[in-house]
Amino acid sequence: MSIISNYQINLNSLNRSNYYATNSNNCRFKIQDVITFQNKKKIYLTLPRLTLPPTIYNISSLSGNNSLIFTEDTVPSTTPLTMTVSIPSGNYTVASFITALSLAMTTASASLGYGQTYTGSYNTTTGQITMSMVGSPAGFMIKAYTFLGQDQDLKQFLGFNAQYNNTTIVNPTASYSFVGFGPANFASPDSIFVRCSIVRTDASYDTNTQNNNIGGPSNILRVIPITGNGFNQINYDDWEGIEAIRQEISNNDLTNNGIQIYFTSSNPYFLIDMANYDWIGTLQVNYTNAMTR
């Protein structure tokens, strides 16, 4: 027979290790050995409470989705010139996105391309974005966009989905304008995946996570839905359902290795950008003691 006990640890990203050299979306905490965990029979970890800052960026260099590769050329084609542009991290609307991308493409063309000026428009009926060279120059064209892998570059914001990963899309009209394939998607992530270095949610536990490296499909501590826009504070409390989602950890992990908490989208390799604002939460440790006579 065993006795089940619990212990709560209050976390604040202000108290993370190496505060000034790290980001709040990827924190390591040193947990003092206030309980002798080494002799416990079973140890489980869960996250019943979390308050996140009112800033979740839908476009971010941390998420890897803020760049675009495009190619200019002459008409007829002579020397294609390919450029990579990046826009600043932020929570964009269609209008602010078009402004930022137009500026980035214009700047890149001035130094690496054919010196074209760009503008954009949005079709409220189809949801498609069109990027164009200003003045409709007859001798030049936007030849192609080149898209990268999952959750990388700006493809979703131009109406291209994962079908176009690692693909170059040639402009079908060979003109000064390029129309997005489908409706632009500016939604922030619909869920935040809270991951923990010492949680092993499947057999493919990635030990690299303990070395401050994110990645791998495991280590999910909690999945928290996002409602509203990216500037709403997220307050999450679920004390009643914690038994269903608690994760078993090894006896020594909690105190010997410390805890790394990090936040990603469904893609475990890309961090959620919270603009380095701080957060608070509660870890609950459930453990059993073997009953002695």
Image: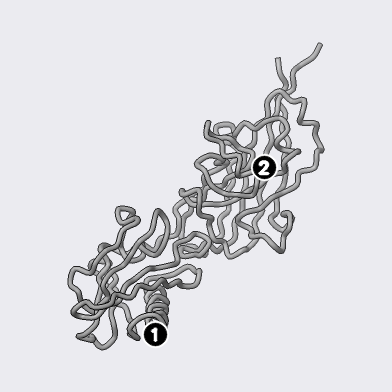
Instruction: Report the quarter where the C terminus lies.
Output: top right
Judging from the image, what secondary structure is the residue with disc 1 in? helix
Query: Would you call the spot at circle 1 few (<14 residues within 10 Å), some (14-19), or many (20 or more)?
Result: few
Residue 84 is situated, as x and y percent measured from the top left of the image, at: 41, 71
Q: Amino acid at mark 2?
A: Leu
Say whether disc 2 or disc 1 marks the residue closer to the N-terminus. Answer: 1
Answer left or right for 248 relative to 172: right
Residue 98 is situated, as x and y percent measured from the top left of the image, at: 37, 75
Determine the image quadrant of residue 144: bottom left
Of 168 and 129, the residue lying toward us: 168
Tag nearer the camera, 2 or 1: 1
Residue beneath the point at 33% across and 75% down: 81
Pointer 1: what residue? 110
Q: Inspect this view and state whether residue 48 appears.
A: no
Query: Would you call the spot at circle 2 few (<14 residues within 10 Å), some (14-19), or many (20 or more)?
Result: some
Residue 160 is situated, as x and y percent measured from the top left of the image, at: 31, 60
Judging from the image, what secondary structure is the residue with disc 2 in? strand
Farthest bottom residue? 135
Of 42 and 115, the residue lying toward us: 115
Question: Separation of disc 2 and disc 1 at Cα?
Answer: 52 Å
Pointer 2: what residue? 283
Q: Amino acid at mark 1?
A: Ala
Reply above or below: 142 against 114.
above
Answer left or right for 243 relative to 125: right
Residue beneath the point at 53% across and 39% down: 218
Residue beneath the point at 26% across and 62% down: 182
